[in-house]
Amino acid sequence: MIDNYEIIGLIAATLTTASFIPQVYKTWKTKDVSSLSLTMYLVFFTGIVLWLIYGIHLKSLAMIVSNIVTGILAIMLIVFKLVYTNNKN
Amino acid sequence: MIDNYEIIGLIAATLTTASFIPQVYKTWKTKDVSSLSLTMYLVFFTGIVLWLIYGIHLKSLAMIVSNIVTGILAIMLIVFKLVYTNNKN
């Protein structure tokens, strides 16, 4: 049975994952990457890969799904940062 | 005893938390917030508060500490975004 705290955990996972969608959308629309930190997203992505390994070990579907989605969104921001920075030069 | 997967979880928590430090530093130095999404950080912060509640329930020190630190860093970015956007107008 899923108790209230598990629901809080699932909502937490959904929110922290979904939070990157407006950043990806904003960056894709504006192509403005000047204030984004590449270091942040590289370190963050490495952490997400480890969270995914940990989630697979725990057999936690919420952790596996949310970290795969967050990882894809982080890769998109890394690619945007690299492509749009180079295009400017 | 802490097994290898718990160590992976702790490194994951450290990396995803620490990843926000270069963004905070960059934003503080440059005062450039043009490409940061306020929506991202508001949704993200809400998620972090729920992760903290979930971590307190699980009595997970790593989750509690990392979500408090990440929450503080997210608040700093929200404040920077609001202050530096207003200063520009």
Image: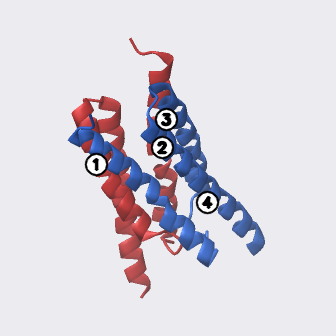
Chain colours: A red, B blue
Q: Residues within 10 Å of mark 2 (few under 14, many from 20)?
A: many
Residue B86 sits in quarter: bottom right
Residue B56 location in percent, x, y? 51, 30
Residue B62 location in percent, x, y? 43, 41
Q: Give the secondary structure at mark 2.
A: helix
The residue indicated by pointer 2 is A16
Residue B6 location in percent, x, y? 29, 39
Q: Residues within 10 Å of mark 3 (few under 14, many from 20)?
A: many
Say if residue A54 shows up in the picture. yes
Identified at 54% across, 46% down, the residue is B44
- Residue type at tag 1: Leu
User: Distance between the Cα atoms at labels 2 and 4?
Assistant: 15 Å
Quadrant that contains the N terminus of chain A: top left
Subunit bearing disc 2: A
Q: Give the secondary structure at mark 1.
A: helix
Q: Residues within 10 Å of mark 1 (few under 14, many from 20)?
A: many
Identified at 54% across, 72% down, the residue is B26
- Residue type at tag 4: Leu
Residue A42 sits in quarter: bottom left
**Mark 1 or 2 closer to N-term?**
2
The residue indicated by pointer 1 is A50
Tags 3 and 4 both on a single chain: no
Answer yes or no: do the residues labelled 3 and 2 have beta carbons within 8 Å? yes
**Nearer the observer, B14 or B49:** B14
**Mark 3 or 1 closer to N-term?**
3
The residue indicated by pointer 3 is A12
For this orientation, the residue located farthest to the bottom is A89
Identified at 47% across, 51% down, the residue is A20
